[in-house]
Amino acid sequence: MYFIKPKFWDKKNNSFLSILLYPLSIIYYLISIIKKKITITQKFNIPIICVGNIYIGGTGKTSAAIEIIKFLNKYKKVCFLTKGYGRKSKKDIFLNELNITNQNTEDTGDEALLLNKFGHVYISNNRAEAINTIIKLGYDAIILDDGFQDHLIFKNINILCFDSKNWVGNNNLVPSGPLREPLVSIKKANFVIIKGEKNQIIEKEIKIINPNIEIIYAENKIENIETLKNKNFIAFTGIGNPYSFFDTLLNHNVKIIKQIIYPDHFQFTEKNYKKLSEEAVNNKCNLITTEKDYVRINNQIKEKIYYTKLNTLLIEKESLEKELRKLF
């Protein structure tokens, strides 16, 4: 099942649909409170760094996790733990440099294959069992992908990711809005990473809830920008926040003729590519997508498609690095 974020989620004023769905958001919230109260948190004999969000999709969570493992790999043996969102397989999969060539996104999910470029990845629907397996494999720390709402697992460091452009949308819980938890849940976090421009209004809202939290900004740079110059593109993507991708291209002066949006974690087929290729021929331009989309595309098609190789810069990250070093 594929998902496209409703546009009314990001409207500051509540729309008719968000008001109509609000009773369901109350039910969702009550269920989450009950679930939290009956869950007994487990502490494991390994440091766990959680990189999550409360806003559904497109907050730069994957990029933040990659930057953290780049830093930790200098000192310790670290493993990503993810559920492999968007995959069809239910079995546990361990990704390292020995078996990466045999994997596809239907088994692993797109984020896992992208993360595996920077570190080992364990994919499992049962996080608690997976943590024990990772410990047995001899790792020193775990980066937990998208586990902020998992109250079963104790985390040594909680990091929440946001996009400054969308922030919290209409500030309602799903399905009336984009939030998985109320904004007050920032109290549980140690750090907030905000993708985008510095925003004092957002910072003030965060600090009112959690005065002691550290705020870090993330800036995306396209590493392979030279290969994209002097070309026209049709940009297509199936990620949680497609407009972030389009904005990144425009901010780097990449010429975009047309934008095409697919559902999040969309599995591209030959038929999709044929249609995209016809569009490119008709508009006399090339095709470009994100690196996360690129790993979901058939290998025979990949050579005909450009993608953005992003490097995320964490601004004023010294406080985060200091806390990460304290774990060992």
Image (tube, helix red, strand yellow):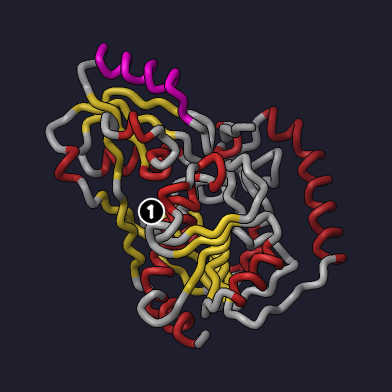
- Residue at image coords 43%, 83%: 322
**Please, what is the dominant secondary structure of the magenta stretch?**
helix
Where residue 141 appears, x then y in whole percent? Answer: 53, 76
- Kindly indicate the quadrant of the structure image that contains residue 45: bottom right
Q: Position of residue 15 (x, y in %)?
A: 65, 31
Residue at mark 1 = 196
Total marks drawn? 1
Q: Is residue 86 left or right of residue 282?
A: right
The residues colored magenta run: 268-282
Estimate the x, y position of residue 317 in percent, counting from the top left. 38, 73
Residue at the far left: name it.
230
Residue nearest the observer in this picture, 127 or 324: 127
**Left or right, 264 with reference to 228:** right
Q: Residue 279 occupies which quadrant of the picture?
A: top left
- Asked if residue 160 shows in the view, the reply is no
Above or below, comparing residue 41 to residue 170 in the picture: below
Q: Is residue 101 left or right of residue 263?
A: left
Looking at the image, which residue is at 61% across and 54% down?
83
Nearest to the observer: residue 161 or residue 170: 161
Work out whether 324 lies above or below 3: below
Q: Secondary structure at mark 1?
A: loop
Q: Residue at x 47, y 80 (%)?
A: 324
Residue type pointed to by label 1: Gly
Q: Extreme top residue here? A: 282
Q: Is residue 279 magenta?
A: yes
Q: Quadrant of the N terminus?
A: top right
Regarding residue 320, the answer to whether it shows in the image is yes
Image x and y of residue 69, in percent = 42, 69
In the rendered structure, does residue 66 fall within the stretch colored magenta?
Answer: no
